[in-house]
Image (cartoon, grey):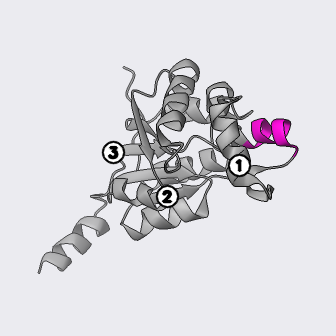
Amino acid sequence: MRILFLILLILIGVNLLMVSKIYVDMDGVIADFDAAYSSIYGCFCRDDPDKEKNFYEAVHKHEIFKYLERMQDAQDLINELNKYDVEIALLSCATPYPNYDKVCDQKEYWARRRFPEFVELNFTYTKEDKGRYAKSDVLLIDDSQACIDAFSVKGGMTILHKNAKDTIMELSRLHSKGLINVRDNG
């Protein structure tokens, strides 16, 4: 009987799964970690044969996360997100010990300077830990398939970020389906 009631609500246009919160990843979505890392080490972190040593050095010596540039299209994405009547928060992987506290401090410094509209900042040890934030009415925008998988398997909604233009189109699609409301500025 309960299932029939839910089907009836869906058929008459009552949406029970409105997005109430959007988590935005930092590196690769709004911050350009790849450019900063490759400017120091001549390659992307994921391709670096000395990744463990160099990443530790990048965090402790260069404070890499403090001084990242914004992704070129980051402001377009943030402007679009601000149109919607949802809470927006940062959800970023800060990598496990021994770098976790330093990375969190650097990412918080960066976010507070570059995007002060992020009131809530959340950091995880691993990509899989992002799944702990998943709920049926919560959306994650992330450029990592592993993070997307961890979030969606726990019941959250996801957008795999490639660039702001495509993500904005996906947000618009969710709005047209009645899953996200536009903010009433009146």
Residue 140 appears in view = yes
Could you give the CA–CA distance between mark 3 and mark 1, rounded to whole angstroms? 40 Å
Where is mark 3, residue-wise? 20
- The quadrant the C terminus occupies is top left
Mark 3 vs 1, N-terminal side: 3
Q: CA distance from mark 3 to mark 2?
A: 13 Å
Residue underneath mark 1: 53
Q: Are marks 3 and 2 in contact (CB under 8 Å)?
A: no
Answer left or right for 80 relative to 71: left
Residue 186 or residue 71, whichever sits in front: 71
Q: Mark 3: which secondary structure?
A: loop
Mark carried by residue 158: 2
Q: Nearer the viewer, residue 86 or 112?
A: 112
Amino acid type, mark 2: Thr
Residue type marked 1: Lys
Residue 166 point in image, percent of width and height: 67, 50
Residue sitting at 57 percent across and 25 percent down?
110
Local SS, label 2? strand
Q: Is residue 124 above or below residue 117?
A: below
| Kind of residue at disc 3 | Ser
How crowded pointer 1 is (Cα within 10 Å; few <14, some 14-19, many 20+) is rated as few
Q: Quadrant of residue 26?
A: top right
Among numbered discs 3 and 2, the one appearing first in the sequence: 3
Which secondary structure dominates the residues rendered in magenta?
helix
Q: Is residue 172 magenta?
A: no
Proximity of marks 3 and 1: CB atoms separated by less than 8 Å:
no
Residue for point 35% across, 53% down: 133
**The residue stretch that appears in magenta:** 34-42
